Image (tube, grey):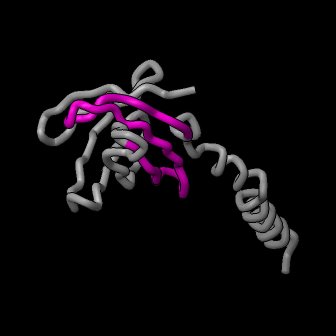
Amino acid sequence: MTKAYQLFFGSILVILCLSTSPLSLAQERSAEPDYSWLNGRWSGPVPAGDNIQMRLEVSNKNEITGQGEIGRRGKLAAARPTITGSITGNQVTLQMYFSRAQQTTTYLCNYVEGSLQCKTKRGFETTFQKVQ
């Protein structure tokens, strides 16, 4: 091989090594959004007229899971929905599944100034606040 070919192939090898280096992989990972602000307890009114206390957690980059507790009658909660959903940017979708009624209520929310401003598909509007 001539020196020109050796320099050419050597340059390509260096470029390939640099393009897949751990530094470039770390930069790609850091570009993922941080949705940890959604983790924790949230509260707000629901269509039935009571308030819900929710505990939400973001996992797998943008999947939401959680539990809720609506109202209290004596020592028992009126309902305890299972919550799932997703988040992209400031848009949050929460789906509350009520096992007794076998019904799901979907909230389409926007994160604005520290609160979730939501609307159900049936038109009910509410705001969920973070509970410290």
Q: Residue at x 54, y 57 (%)?
A: 60
Decide which of 11, 53 is in the foreground and name it. Answer: 53
Quarter of the figure that contains the C terminus: top right
Quarter of the figure that contains the N terminus: bottom right
Q: Which residues are magenta?
A: 40-69
121 to 100, vertically: above or below: above
Principal secondary structure, stretch drawn in magenta:
strand
Q: Is residue 44 left or right of residue 119?
A: right
- Residue 77: x and y, percent? 38, 45
- Residue 18: x and y, percent? 77, 57
Q: Residue 97 sits in which quadrant? A: bottom left
- Residue reaching furthest bottom? 1
Q: Is residue 48 left or right of residue 74?
A: left
Q: Is residue 130 left or right of residue 4?
A: left
- Residue reaching furthest left? 122
Q: Residue at x 57, y 46 (%)?
A: 32
Q: Residue 115 sits in which quadrant? A: top left
Q: Is residue 63 magenta?
A: yes
- Residue reaching furthest front? 74
Q: Residue at x 35, y 52 (%)?
A: 81
16 to 54, vertically: above or below: below
Decide which of 80, 55 is in the foreground and name it. Answer: 80
